[in-house]
Amino acid sequence: MTARSTRRTAAKTRIAAVGAIAVAGTMLLTACGDQTKNNDAGGSETAKTGTGTGTSSPADLLPADIKSKGVIRVGSDIAYPPVEFKDKSGATVGIDPDLAAALGKELGVEFKFENGTFDTLVTGLRSKRYDIAMSAMTDSKERQEGIDPETKKKVGEGVDFVDYFTAGVSIYTRKGDDKGIKTWSDLCGKKIAVQRNTVSHDLAKDESKKCAGGKKIAIEPYDTDLEAQTRIRSGGADAGSSDFPVAAYAVKTSGGGNDFQIVGDQVEAAPYGIAVAKGNDQLTKALKAAMDAIIKSGEYEKVIAKWGVEAGAVTEAKVNGGS
């Protein structure tokens, strides 16, 4: 749940180490209900009430078909804690579901999360299985334009993004066994487990091309970040990589905090975006207006603080702000 997408402009630590403890600590102490279902914490019943009354309200910008259904179908890889995941009761929880509940109140609709593998979410938008994808997806020019980041060839129509958060990428290893890994270049000659089609996957492939003496990086891609963690935990890989909030949560919670450790600094800070299929301009505008509204009202800040990731907060929603 990584920054998950294509390559991002290099940048050093954006979310401080204290955020790692806050993210995981809050998660251990709170178990919010599924924000996409009927409950008192902000599910469908409260989400459908809406808050805007004037002609310029975010709800007025929604496409007519979504207004009539009262539902926005959200494609998401719900296995990326703390961004989105299933709690012990099976409810969908995390940063994205909480933000979606707040957006739903502004728009007067329910955000219904539907689980799918990360690398199929954009296809799901094109086939109209989903209205949006909200899944720690990195906004990048390649994804906006439908360009394959490796071949540089156009493979689709692309999507539009409403940016709502910023995150960097971290490397982690088994606790007490970092194999001398501090930077990406230290991975040459070693094995890394990552989630497929994520920034971490792209970084590993790019770094491997730079390795000297034939000591390439052995890369094992998995459908989910949790599968990659299992491989590292068992000793089948030397290291893993994912978005900092996700890596921090794994370090704090896996094995009671005894399985993993973060090594080195974050890199590749870039925005997460809500993805919308090209041509759905009304929906994009409505989402941007709703995101700006919850930022202004303070609801956004409450969600971000709840999960301990304040340093990744934005002050306004942007459309296609990724590079």
Image (cartoon, rainbow, N blue to C red):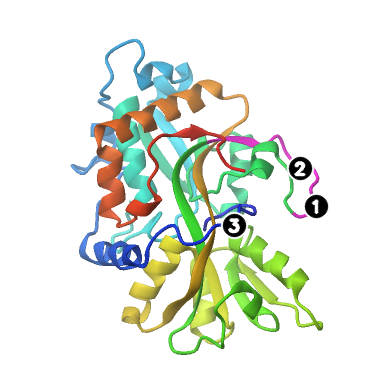
For label 3, the SS is loop
Residue 61 in percent (x, y) is at 43, 18
Q: Determine the residue positioned at 64% across, 58% down.
A: 197
Residue where numbered disc 2 is placed? 155
Residues tagged 2 and 1 counted as in contact (Cβ below 8 A)? yes
Residue holding disc 3: 10
Number of dots carrying numbers: 3
- The relative height of residue 292 versus residue 19 in the rendered view (above or below) is above
State the extent of the magenta-drawn residues as a range. Answer: 150-161
Q: Residue 195: give x, y in percent of width and height.
A: 58, 64
User: Relative to residue 219, is residue 132 drawn left or right?
Assistant: left
Callout in the foreground (2, 3): 3
Q: How would you classify the magenta stretch by its main secondary structure?
A: loop
**Residue at the left extreme of this rendering:** 40
Mark 1 residue type: Thr
Marks 2 and 3, the one that precedes in the sequence? 3
- Residue at position x 38%, y 33% in the image: 291
